[in-house]
Image (spheres, rainbow, N blue to C red):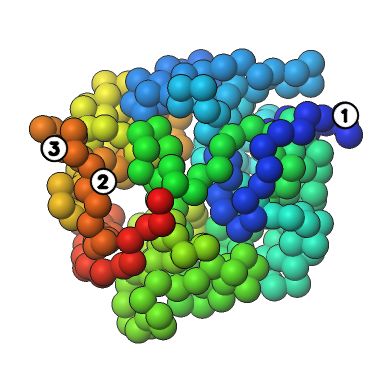
Amino acid sequence: MIVFGPERRHGVANQPARFAWYEILTTDVAAASAFYGSVVGWRVKDASSPELAYTVLAVGEDSVGGLMELPEEGRRLGATPRWMGYVAVDDIDATAAQIGRRGGAVLLPPTDSNIGRVSVVADPQKATFALVSGLTFGQPQSGALDEPGRVGWHELLAENRNTVFDFYGELFGWQKDQGEADPADVYQAFSVGGETIGGMLTKLPIVQHACWLYYFNVDDIDEAATRVNAGGGRILQGPLELHDSWWIARCVDPQGALFALQGVRGQGAAERPSASEVSWSAKWGGIASQGRMVLQKRKR
């Protein structure tokens, strides 16, 4: 995001409590633009202002995310390249204040920027994300979760997913799928407005910090994985089959930002799955756990 004064553009309305925008902070904008353009198929559009350079990532004519240089101040403080998801809210000042009262942290107070009024925050287990109101870019994500180039899944790798869920539930009204899950279960899917959009799991020790991981939809998981390696990134896990020819791969880009891919494999790419099952898998450093749950179908 570019932070600047009150004269800013107004555009697409927020969908409260949903992820509405995604942004990558990187140490090499040109290389990251080329990498994600190849892997995910995003077009890049210059949206710079006199204050700072900014690149928009687009699917066709629809803007889905932004790309900008990791600020020098952040680098000095030890920040590394990363993806940031923005959750749309109606009252960003009240939501940021609520985060502080509930044990989270406000890293950037509500501020006007080129993408709307924004605030960078962290949950009580220090996983960072952002808030946005008056979003000036992007399209509503409802109904587009399965389309190529969109973000199709949002996964929280938590210090303890059992204790952190209430924070998000009370803050955004997110609901646990399958009713009240057994605390012994590893994975908890969650929904907003009746649509399942992500899951939470307790991270393994090899994952150093709690974080959000975003899954980008691709037409062919094998071709996308090949492009990750060819572009200088790495596949950390996968491709791993979940259900009905649906596959995922967890990756890192050439500058070190974590992301994930999901899609079908090979000849199955022409037909997308419509099953109501979601499988999960956590495997880092040779330690693995797997399972399966049945969910209500997403609303279209």
- What whole-number distance in Å separates the C-alpha atoms at marks 2 and 3? 14 Å
Residue type marked 2: Ile
Q: Is residue 289 above or below residue 119?
A: below
At numbered mark 2, what does the secondary structure look like: helix, strand or loop? strand
Residue 220, image quadrant? top left
Q: Residue at x 22, y 67 (%)?
A: 292
Identify the residue position indicated by label 3 in the image: 268
The reply to whether dot 1 and dot 3 touch (C-beta < 8 Å) is no
Residue 39, image quadrant? top left
Q: Residue at x 36, y 76 (%)?
A: 178
Camera-side mark, 1 or 3: 3
N-terminal of the pair, mark 2 or mark 3, is 2
Pinpoint residue 117: horizontal percent, then vertical percent. 77, 43
- What whole-number distance in Å separates the C-alpha atoms at marks 1 and 2? 42 Å
At numbered mark 3, what does the secondary structure look like: helix, strand or loop? helix
Q: Nearer the viewer, residue 71 or 222?
A: 222
Q: Which mark is residue 248?
A: 2
Pinpoint residue 171: horizontal percent, then vertical percent. 65, 68
Residue 103, image quadrant? bottom right
Identify the residue position indicated by label 1 in the image: 7
